[in-house]
Structures are given as structure tokens and as C-alpha cells.
Image (tube, helix red, strand yellow):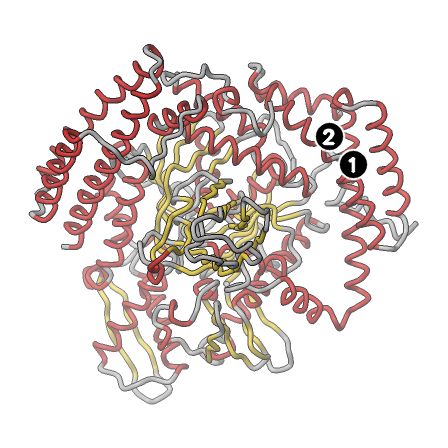
Amino acid sequence: MALFHIAEPGESAAPHQHKLAVGIDLGTTNSLVATVRSGMAVVLNDEQGRPLLPSIVRYLPDGQVEVGYGAQSWQARDPKNTVVSVKRFMGRGRKDIAHVESLPYDFVDEPGMVRVKTCAGVKSPVEVSAEILKVAKARAEAHLGGELVGAVITVPAYFDDAQRQATKDAARLAGINVLRLLNEPTAAAIAYGLDNAAEGIYAVYDLGGGTFDISILKLSKGVFEVLATGGDSALGGDDFDQRIFCWVLEQAKLPPLSHEDARLIMTRAREAKEFLTSHAEAPITVKLSSGPTIDLTLDVATFAEITRNLVTKTLQAVRKALRDAGLRPEEVKGVVMVGGSTRVPQVQRAVAEFFGQEPLNNLDPDKVVALGAATQANLLVGNKTGGDDWLLLDVIPLSLGLETMGGLVEKVIPRNSTIPAARAQDFTTFKDGQTAMAIHVVQGERELVSDCRSLARFELRGIPPMVAGAARIRVTFQVDADGLLAVSAREQTTGVESSITVKPSYGLSDDEIAAMLKDSMSHAKDDAQRRALKEAQVEAQRLIEATQAALKEDAHLLSAEEIARIEASIAKLQTLMLGDNRRHINLAMDDLGYETQEFAHRRMDQSVKRALAGRKVDDLNTAEEGSQS
Amino acid sequence: MDLTTDFFSLFQLPRAFRIDLGELDARYREIQAQVHPDRYAHAGEGVRRLSMQWATRANEGYLTLKKPLERAKYLLHLAGHDLQAESNTAMAPEFLMEQMEWREAVMEARSGGDHHELEHLHHRLRQDLQGRYEELAALLDDKRDPEAATEQVRRLMFLEKLLLEIDDALASLEDGEMDN
């Protein structure tokens, strides 16, 4: 049947065939897409051969959207509708955004996340980011000649839960299956470590357009272990531009500027910064629309002076991360520099001085994150190339906690905990007959709730009336491998339960995303339905293959009767998959999932036992590969 | 071997305070290599959830056994001796006196910005802790005296907290110096 397009490139049926996966570095200034080709990670260029995709989105009155270089040329002419550095607004309220008054946008301050009013309507940062991701996805699919199985999207290590969730939502909105949210410095460490067979303690200093991260990692025999991370999710190259901008205003003694002129000076400021990476001074010439012409010269020494405390701030975060890792600067074997802003000479100098060694600059600081993400994506979809196999142990950057009496924070999971992580804490009622308990989840290091980021509030209701202190309410935090938190609460004596995936108070609810997806597809409704059906079919095929492979390997873990039941479920799904009823396919998949649950448990237990029985991981993998071919 | 296996059995280590930390590291990595969510990123939802639970459990177990104080608490817990940290706060008066002296010394050094004195206190406390952990090892592994071990654990909880306070004071002094 023509309906059955399963064997398209990229969604190939056979498990040993190459699956299409990419790494996407969704940057403040620029984004990149990379993939692994013939065992090598490569950045995918646009049609003009350019690797970068400027993270700039312009909305037009007719509903058209321009992304990248096309939008970039409009930022001074149409500043209100041309959104730059949207990453700085992800998961942020208006009050959290630095220099908000100097930005040209009409902000709408919604609870949780700020939105921007454009000529095409009010847009959330999630929607704007989704436009960038859509272009990245299209670029990948054009190169690879098929639909993507999934992508690893990178985020700053110091991104909190709100910012991570917003990023994941943006990817979903762009129709991307997110294999993992990967921390940018960790991605860089993978790219660097695999390239150089690095062993020992490494620091990754990542100064991007809008964010700063420092991660301390231990690299040893195929294990990348993050020991500590720190940073500032609102400090980056943009701030260096901002300092030059302010210097220009001061020097030229300018009256209040129009948004267009302000944008223009900001652009010149950025150009001057870039010029100073290889020159002793930079000319700044701007012809303002209001008449006057600015003609200034900025020298390196002045530039270093006006940005000195930005550099100092990064070094403070470095010290803190080292302290958390229990290490001294001289114990670090190498410092990997990542992010375009590490090209700034005074940054290079300060880092070299701090660590007492020249930082490593042998990888392109713009590309290294995307390359690492592509390598990880390739591993996650199961494209094994040669003996490449590694384990990544990452951490959460900020402590997670709960509000307790008096507006104080009780930390539940401390920062730098290896993820996935879970922790339960017991609480009790403080009033006689109390039947509900408010649970307020926060993130941050400070003692007062008001100084931390509020992530979610929810209520556990239906607690049976008891005397104060008699109820036992267990609140459980679970952080997954993407660094995202889910919280549940349960009254122990009665089993009353309530849980939440921390998100609605700042992000988009699932309903909102569904509505947006529907909106974006309403002009092609049939298209959307066909697409959904196809996705279900592909998913079903994947599930069947995985189950069959598992049966082939581990049938000995099951009784004849159990095998028969699983095989019956497979047969049913195989039949339904050929039809066009998506709901039936999904139900049959749920059914197969249910029938194989116990099998999955036994297989996992077995693999742990095997690992401990002294068999090397390598032996196991070889055995698995052998049995597949 | 399943999700409810105790941490010593999980990492195939003897149920004792003195353990080989190198072994622990190796076993932890072997288990994570098998169960980590990155191994199952492309699997069905049920398997992904299971992998997360296993990896979470391995992380929790690793942390518990790696830190000596946590390891001791866990050993006592397995042996049915819970610490009742909140309800039972009785402490020997000499120990409490000693604590007060320590705390005064830390406070004085902190308010005077005495970096050197804080370093000195840190060093002294470290030595004190080391001696106490050796005693604790003997109580748990040789003398098998859970009551005395519990008492020692509760003192160690005080002292570890004090060490954290000293380190925090040192950190804020260093950050202050950076600002200038």
C-alpha cells in the first residue's frame, strides 16, 4: 500500500540502518545544526554555504515569518517586529530581563513568561524560538534527505527549570522529537574529549551571546562526568555590546534616541567588539536618522576597562564551581573555550591568568557545541560507529526546594546533584483539621523564597482531618535526564495523591501547545492528520522492531505463555498499523507496552546483573550487535 | 537484583563501613552504563521510565555509600537503628561545651575577616573529623556497637555542619576579595 511509507530514508525499518539525528545549538546570537556523517560530526550549511543561522525572527503583517540572515538585515529598519536574542526571554518575566527599557519591543507581561507584541500578533519566546528551530529542522532534512528521527537540543548548563521547559516546548512546537536537552559545556566537552582522547579534569568556559556557563568535568575511559557547574544565564556577549553602546552614548552626549537609531548604534557596537579581537582600536561611525553623525575610536584598553566587571563576574562563577567540585585551579588539566565571546582578548587573558595556563582554542568556539550535540544525538538513536560508546553523567545547576513556614526554602535536591535524581521529604500539617496543603516549588540557592525562582504551586487536597502534626505528607521530587522536574505529593496514611510536572505557572500548558500546533496547521488540516497518522505508524513500527529484537535476545526470561501474549499483541498492532485509524494504532501500542512491561523489568535487572558479574560493557555491546546482524 | 535491592548488594560490596571506594566507583559506572536513560532515549515510554528509575537509584546509592557519614547512617538504618535526629537531641555536656567554643572561634574569625584563622580552624576540624571517622569504623565494623556508633554519628553530623560553615565563611571572604 502506498500509505505505508515506513521505509523512507531516515526512518528505515532495519535496526542496523543509519537513523537521521541532529544536534541543534539554539544560540542567543546564532544557531547551528550538525550531524554525524560517516563517523564524523559536521555542521550543516545553508544553501549559500553558510554554517550559522542568525537567531533572528522577523514577523510580517501578512503572517509570513523571516528567519536568519533575511531577518537580520531588517533589525534596524523594523526593530519592533524583528526579534533578536530571544533566548534571553525564554522562561522569563519582564522584570527578569536586563536593560529591558533599551529594547525596542512592545512587551506584554504575562504571568510567568513575557511576550512580544508584533504586527503578526502577540508572540511568546517559545513561539519565536520554534521559528528558528523549524528552519534548523528544514535545513537538516534537506541535507539528509528524510525526516528526522530526533534531535539533541543544547541549553546553557545554568538554565533553570523554566528555561529548559520553554526550550523543550519550542522544539515540540517546531515538530522536533527531542532526544535530550544537553548542556552546552557538556556538549563541547564531548566534542573536545573524543577528538583529543582527553583524560583528567577539564574546565569548559562557555561565554555565548547571552549566557555564561562554567562546567568542571572529569573525563576518564569513556565516561564524561560533570563534577560541578555554574554560571549566569543573563551574561554574555550582548552585555559587552551594551557596555560599548553606553560608552558611545556617553562620549557623544546624545539626546534620547529612536529605536531605529539605538539598534543601529548597538549593531556598530557589536562590530567594534569583533574588530577589537584582532586590532588595537576600532572606529565607530554612525550616521543617525535624527541628523548627527557619531565618529569615535574605541581602543582595546578602554574596551577592557568598561567590561572589566563582566569578566570578573565570570571568574567568580568559576571559583564557585571549582569550590563545589572540591578542586583548586591548578588541578585542572585543560580549559576548553567555547562561545564566540571567548574571542574577546581580555577574556582570554583573564582565563589564562586564573588557571595559570593558556586555554585550549583548537576547536571553533562557534561550532563545538553543535558538533558535540550531533555526536550525542547519533549515540542516542543507536547509530553506533565503531567502538564509540560513552557514558555521560550530568548535574542540575541550581538547588530545588520547597517553601516552608515563614517564607524559607527547604532544599530538597541540592545543586550539582547527578541526574536523574529523586528525593522525598516528609511534611506535616500545622493546624488541627487541616485538609489541604499548599506546595510551592522553588529553584535557587538563597534562603528566602522571595530570592529564588518560583517554579510551580499546587495543592494537595482531601487530607482527612487530623490533629496538627499527625498527617504524613511525602513530597517527592524527580529530575529526569533533561534536568526537568516533576513533583508529587502523597498523604502517607490515606494515600491521597497529587502530582505536577512543573510547568504551567511559567510555561505553556499542553493545551496551549496543542492549540498552537493546530493553528499553525489549520490551513493544512488534512496534512496535519496525515502527518499524525504517519507518525503513529512509524512509532508502531519502531516499537515492534524493538520488541522483536528483545524477544530474540532474551526470550529465556519469559514463559511460553508470556511470549504468546506478546506475539499476539505484536500481530494485532501489525494489522492495525496498515489501516488509517490512528486511535486504534495508539491503543494497540499501549496494549503492547502493557504486555511487555514485566519483560522490560526483567531485562533491565538482567543487564545490571550481567554488568556486575564482571562482563565488560564492551563485551555486552559486541554480543548485542552480533545478535542483531 | 531489582529496584529494592539495598545499596551494598546493588554495588556488590560487603555491608561494612570500610569499603573500597575504587570498587564503588567502578561498580557505579558499570551499572550506569547499563541503565542510564541515554541508553534508552529511543525506547518506548515504559522502558524510558524504568531506566530513569534505575539510574536514579544508582545515583542515590552511589551518593549514600560514597560519603562516610551517609554510609554510616545507612548502615545503622539497615541494622534497624534509626537516628531520631530530631526527637533525640541529648548530647554529652562536654561535647556541647566544645561545640560552643568552636562556634565562637569561627564567628570571631569570620567577623574579623581572618582568612588565616579560618584556614587553621578548617584544618584542625578536618583532623578531628578524621580521628572520629576511624573510631566510627571500629565501632561499626570491629566492635559492632550500634549504640555507640549512633552517638558518634550524631556528633559527626554537628561537626560536618560546622565544617560547612567554615567553608562558607572562607568562600564569602574570597569572593569579597575578588570584588575589590
Secondary structure at badge 1 equals helix
Q: Is residue B94 left or right of residue A117?
A: left
Quarter where residue A461 is shown = bottom right
Write down the chain letter for disc 1. A
Instruction: Identify which residue, A305 or A276, lies in the foreground.
Output: A305
Q: Is residue A106 left or right of residue A230?
A: right
The residue that disc 1 covers is A595
Residue with the most extreme top position:
B142
- Chain designation of label 2: A
Q: Position of residue A5 (x, y in %)?
A: 83, 49
Q: Mark 2: few, some, or many residues within 10 Å (few <14, many ≥20)?
A: many
Q: Quadrant of residue B116?
A: top left
Q: Report the residue marked by disc 2.
A: A599
Q: Residue furthest bottom?
A: A291
The reply to whether dot 1 and dot 2 touch (C-beta < 8 Å) is yes
> Is residue A236 in sight in this rendering?
no
Q: Position of residue A39 (x, y in %)?
A: 60, 35
Closest to the observer, A269 or A581 = A581
Which image quarter holds the C terminus of chain A? top right
